[in-house]
Image (cartoon, rainbow, N blue to C red):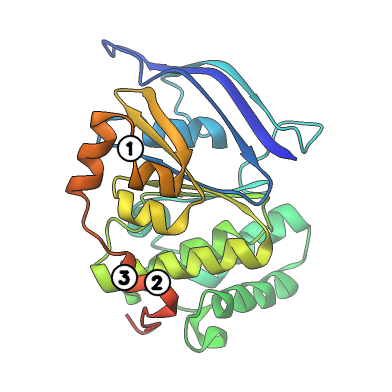
């Protein structure tokens, strides 16, 4: 069953000479892993934020997004978990990480603080951070970039969303940690049966993680299809360029070969 269907999706930012998105249409099945790829400025993040309902006030959106698995529009935080590119910017620097996760649980599940904090510790363990009972009291500045992104993932899945959106969630990390985060995301969405929209400029990452790929260029959908087809036999010259330019990190995550170093 379709989780969502988007049609004619266009986004224009005030003062911009051209639309950031122009007439995008796609569907996402329940539990499906979809990658959105393209170079910087192609509209990837705009598409992700439009789906999540997180466009800034200066953006004008047209078109429709129908959530066929729901009677009402999806709610950010509850029905959609969102992992941003830079965990240092997405986490509140003056709030302990456990409390930031617990706040999501408390808001959407209606739990009290003790139960929410206990759930936060469970989620820190779920994202493979060491000593979660102590980690709930850690401050963001005490953590590495990889650890911060694991905390951000824990917060994004705290309300058990139907859809997880990872917006360039690995691009600020080094190659080994990037592979670990990709492995973690894949494990979570498979075990929790979440759908995934994975935004990236790296087609090798997209092909390893996703079942289907959407290629964007200048806000337009250039090509879409099964991941193996897009990588193995791209129909558009732009997609071929992305394939040829991509660094192949798939070998780092394939077959569980990535090192799960939570101390990074």
User: Between 142 and 24, which is closer to the camera in this rendering?
Assistant: 24
Q: Is mark 1 in CB contact (under 8 Å) with mark 2?
A: no
Q: Is residue 55 above or below residue 189?
A: above
User: Between 52 and 105, which is closer to the camera in this rendering?
Assistant: 52
Give me the C-alpha separation between circle 3 and circle 2.
5 Å
Give me the C-alpha separation between circle 3 and circle 1.
21 Å
Residue 192: quadrant of the picture: bottom right
Instruction: Kindly identify the residue that appears in the image at 21 percent across and 57 percent down.
Output: 247
Q: Which mark is residue 254?
A: 2
Residue 39 visible from this viewpoint? no
User: Between 142 and 261, which is closer to the camera in this rendering?
Assistant: 261
Kindly state the secondary structure of the residue where label 3 is placed: helix
Q: What residue is pinned by disc 3?
A: 251
First in sequence, mark 1 or 2: give its number: 1
Instruction: Kindly identify the residue that appears in the image at 43 percent across and 76 percent down.
Output: 255
Q: Which image quarter holds the N terminus?
A: top right
Residue 197 visible from this viewpoint? yes
Q: Specify few, some or many for label 1: CA neighbours under 10 Å numbering under 14, 14-19, or 20 or more.
A: some
Q: Specify few, some or many for label 3: CA neighbours under 10 Å numbering under 14, 14-19, or 20 or more.
A: some
Q: What residue is pinned by disc 1?
A: 234
- Looking at the picture, how far across and down is residue 42, in whole percent? 30, 30
Q: Is mark 3 in CB contact (under 8 Å) with mark 2?
A: yes
User: Between 86 and 36, which is closer to the camera in this rendering?
Assistant: 36
């Amino acid at each position: 069953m379709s989780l969502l269907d988007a049609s004619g999706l266009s986004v224009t930012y005030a003062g911009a000479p051209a639309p950031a998105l122009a007439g995008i249409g796609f569907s996402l099945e329940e539990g499906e892993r979809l990658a959105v790829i393209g170079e910087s400025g192609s509209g990837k993040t705009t598409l992700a934020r439009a789906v999540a309902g997180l466009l800034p006030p200066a953006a004008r959106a047209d078109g429709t997004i129908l959530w066929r698995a729901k009677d009402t529009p999806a709610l950010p935080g509850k029905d959609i978990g969102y992992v941003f590119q830079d965990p240092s910017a997405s986490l509140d620097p003056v709030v302990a990480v456990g409390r930031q996760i617990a706040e999501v649980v408390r808001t959407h599940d209606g739990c009290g603080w003790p139960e929410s904090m206990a759930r936060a510790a469970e989620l820190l363990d779920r994202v493979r951070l060491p000593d979660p009972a102590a980690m709930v009291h850690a401050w963001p500045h005490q953590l590495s970039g990889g650890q911060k992104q694991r905390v951000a993932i824990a917060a994004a899945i705290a309300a058990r969303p139907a859809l997880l959106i990872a917006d360039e969630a690995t691009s600020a990390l080094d190659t080994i940690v990037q592979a670990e985060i990709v492995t973690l995301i894949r494990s979570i969405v498979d075990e929790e049966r979440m759908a995934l929209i994975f935004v990236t400029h790296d087609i090798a990452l997209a092909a390893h993680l996703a079942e289907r790929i959407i290629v964007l260029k200048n806000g337009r959908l250039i090509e879409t299809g099964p991941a193996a087809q897009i990588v193995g036999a791209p129909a558009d010259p732009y997609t071929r360029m992305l394939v040829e330019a991509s660094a192949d990190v798939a070998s780092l995550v394939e077959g569980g070969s990535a090192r799960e170093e939570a101390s990074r």
